[in-house]
Image: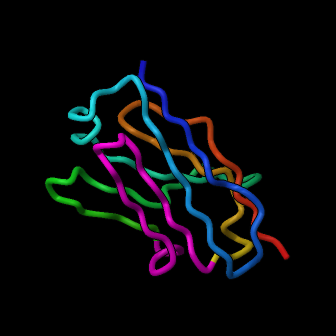
Amino acid sequence: QVQLVESGGGLVRPGGSLRLSCVASGISRSDFSSYVVGWYRQAPGKEREVVAKIDSLNTGQTFYVDSVKGRFTISRDDAKITAHLQMNSLKPEDTAVYYCHLADYWGQGTQVIVSS
């Protein structure tokens, strides 16, 4: 059974930074490297939305929702079966629970609160 565990969330002031991590278990490095990894978020009262995705290292292609372009960076380390989301210049509207996604699997989420 594949498990995804997110970490790195917390309370940060506007303009601050956080780095989220997603560690996978129950999956080989080879299989992990072949999957697209995504970060999603869900704010209170809103639907879950995609934030960023990264393709396998064969292509390395990335996707970002417009609202985070230039501020967030998604990366992956297939050797460590890990993905990251570096979030800079955070805004109050980035407040949400952030989820890691791979294939049919979701993590439990990590809370990000941006507030002064």
Most foreground residue, 79 or 98: 79
Image quadrant in which the C terminus is located: bottom right
Residue 40 lies, in percent from the top left, at 53, 52
Q: Quadrant of residue 107?
A: top right
Residue 83: within the magenta?
yes
Coloring scheme used: rainbow
Q: Is residue 32 left or right of residue 19?
A: left
Asked which quadrant contains residue 14, the reply is: bottom right
Q: Return the residue found at the far top.
A: 1
Magenta residues? 66-89
Give left or right: position of 43 versus 102.
Answer: right
Identified at 29% across, 37% down, the residue is 32
User: So how many labels did they put on this image?
Assistant: 0
Task: From this view, report whether residue 33 is shown above or below residue 93.
Answer: above
Q: Picture coordinates of residue 114 (x, y %)?
A: 75, 69
**Residue for point 45% across, 31% down:** 105
Q: Is residue 101 above or below residue 86?
A: above
- Taking depth in this image into account, of 70 and 23 the one nearest to the observer is 23
The quarter in which the N terminus is drawn is top left
Residue 35 in the image: x percent, y percent? 27, 41
Which residue is depicted at the point 43% across and 35% down? 24
Where residue 62 appears, x then y in whole percent?
Answer: 31, 64
Task: Name the residue furthest right.
Answer: 116
In the image, what residue occupies the spot 67% across and 50% down?
A: 97
Residue 97 inside the magenta-drawn segment = no
State whether residue 12 is above or below residue 80. Answer: below
Residue that sits furthest to the front in the current view: 80
